[in-house]
Image (tube, rainbow, N blue to C red):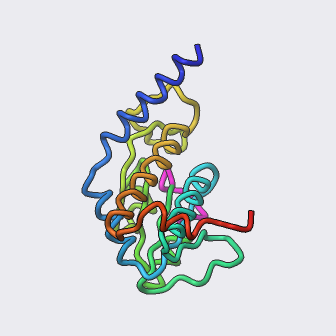
């Protein structure tokens, strides 16, 4: 029974990620390389996925900050705010996007709904076709998994793929990344 669940989940993830536009992934990767600093924002499980990504960006030697943490500086021109929001309508994150725009920062969004409120503010958007119950317009995607699992898992794997792409672009090896790994453990 559990093995069947794993097979279904893996199949869903593979099919979902293979549908993501490669050009938009490359565009976000380029925006990250060009950014002075990278800010990450999301709520709930999406926010946790962005925190994982923030850690890997730091391991790559980039200046990355999670919005809402006590050591996060103010955002400004030359910075990039990356948002993970399945609905693209999350209230607090939409406020962050508007504030970033006000300070001439660029915005990257990973979402199910690219034409959402946050999507209209974004400079770079990656669309993941996954099911959600949070948007009244709905979409056609289905999953055996509950709630936003497919989006959140796809978000994490997509971001891990971007890390590998950034390693290539920045000429950073896993050994170099390990030098930035926490040693106060």
Q: Is residue 139 left or right of residue 47?
A: left
| Vertical arrangement, residue 147 with respect to residue 51, above or below | above
Q: Position of residue 25 (x, y in %)?
A: 32, 57
Quadrant (top left/top right/bottom left/bottom right) for the N terminus: top right
| Vertical arrangement, residue 64 with respect to residue 158, above or below | below
Q: Residue furthest top?
A: 1
Q: Residue furthest left?
A: 23
Secondary structure that dominates the magenta span:
loop
Q: Magenta stretch?
A: 85-94
Q: Position of residue 92 (x, y in %)?
A: 61, 64
| Vertical arrangement, residue 44 with respect to residue 8, above or below | below
22 or 137: nearer the viewer: 22
Q: Quadrant of residue 36?
A: bottom left
Q: Quadrant of residue 173?
A: bottom left
Q: How many marks?
A: 0
Q: Position of residue 174 (x, y in %)?
A: 46, 60
Residue at (47, 22) in percent of width and height: 7
Residue at (41, 27) in percent of width and height: 11
Q: Residue furthest right?
A: 185
Q: Is residue 68 left or right of residue 128?
A: right
Residue at (60, 65) in percent of width and height: 181
Residue at (59, 18) in percent of width and height: 2
Q: Position of residue 68 (x, y in %)?
A: 66, 70
Q: Does the stretch in magenta take in 185?
A: no
Quadrant (top left/top right/bottom left/bottom right) for the C terminus: bottom right
Q: Quadrant of residue 167?
A: bottom left
88 or 39: nearer the viewer: 39
Q: Does the stretch in magenta take in 90?
A: yes
């Amino acid at each position: 029974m559990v093995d069947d669940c794993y097979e279904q989940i893996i199949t869903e993830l593979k099919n979902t990620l293979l549908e993501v536009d490669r050009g938009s992934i490359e565009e976000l990767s380029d925006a990250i390389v060009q950014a002075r600093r990278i800010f990450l924002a999301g709520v709930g499980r999406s926010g946790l996925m962005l925190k994982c990504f923030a850690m890997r960006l730091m391991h790559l030697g980039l200046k990355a900050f999670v919005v809402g943490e006590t050591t996060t500086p103010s955002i400004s021109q030359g910075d990039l705010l990356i948002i993970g929001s399945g609905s693209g309508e999350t209230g607090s994150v939409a406020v962050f996007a508007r504030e970033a725009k006000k300070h001439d920062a660029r915005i990257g969004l990973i979402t199910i709904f690219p034409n959402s409120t946050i999507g209209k503010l974004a400079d770079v958007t990656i669309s993941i076709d996954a099911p959600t119950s949070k948007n009244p317009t709905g979409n056609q995607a289905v999953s055996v998994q509950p709630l936003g699992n497919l989006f959140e898992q796809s978000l994490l794997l997509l971001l891990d793929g971007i890390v590998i792409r950034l390693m290539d672009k920045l000429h950073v090896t896993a050994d170099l990344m390990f030098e930035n790994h926490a040693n106060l453990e």
